[in-house]
Amino acid sequence: ERLKAHLEAGKPARTFAMTDEEREIVSGWFLLTDKPVIYAANIADSEIGQPDSAHVKAVREIAQAEGSQVFTISAQIEEEIAQMEPEEKDAFLTELGLGQSGLDRLIAACYTLLGLISFLTSGEDECRAWTITNGTKAPQAAGKIHSDIERGFIRAEVIAYEDMIACGSVNAAKEKGLLRSEGKEYVVQDGDMVYFRFNV
């Protein structure tokens, strides 16, 4: 009844204070306004690096009242970036004083908001990122690739992405002792490069 009154007042479910027991009940209703939100405020390219405009301030006030995040992003700049080669893109972002594109920052924020991370696998013909929930153990992460790998899990050989890049290859990292063997209780970390060993 309290939540019904809250919703009928035009307020989103995510701003309704609930006990753990109430939260468990409400989560099964899959209310749209209970979903986490990130606001993206579209700005002109001339506004990049400038103080917030009145419109952006208004969006920030709405987001703050809901406990949500706000990102400023220039759709015009993002459109230009999308048409560039990687080398051009990096130079363009540096010229604007930006480390990443707005889209890249927005994706990272969404992953954080949803409690997601990525781990990597690499083979002869491809390198691939797999999305998992933060806190996932190695066998369950293996199951994202194939259920047979999870069932037959023996161990995970893990190296941090930054270590592999710094060494230049997996073999070089292995020689430096940076490739480690982890068991079933290992919690996969964001950016781990993982090689799963399993029984067929």
Image (cartoon, grey):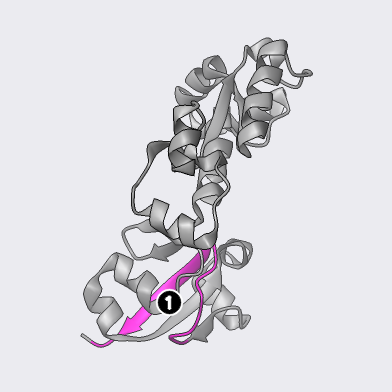
Residue at the image position 54 percent from the left and 48 percent from the top: 113
Q: Is residue 101 magenta?
A: no
Residue at the image position 34 percent from the left and 48 percent from the top: 29
Q: Which residues are magenta?
A: 183-199
**Left or right of residue 123, residue 44 in this image:** right
Residue 101 screen position, x and y as percent: 58, 32
Judging depth in this view, the residue of 128 and 154 nearest the camera is 154
Q: Is residue 188 magenta?
A: yes
Judging depth in this view, the residue of 170 and 118 nearest the camera is 118
Residue 156 screen position, x and y as percent: 43, 81
- Mark 1 is surrounded, within 10 Å at the Cα level, by few (under 14), some (14 to 19) or many (20 or more) other residues, namely many
**Left or right of residue 67, residue 54 in this image:** right
Judging depth in this view, the residue of 52 and 84 nearest the camera is 52
Residue at the image position 77 percent from the left and 18 percent from the top: 50
Residue beneath disc 1: 138
Instruction: Say what secondary structure mark 1 lies in.
Output: helix
| Three-letter residue code for mark 1 | Ala
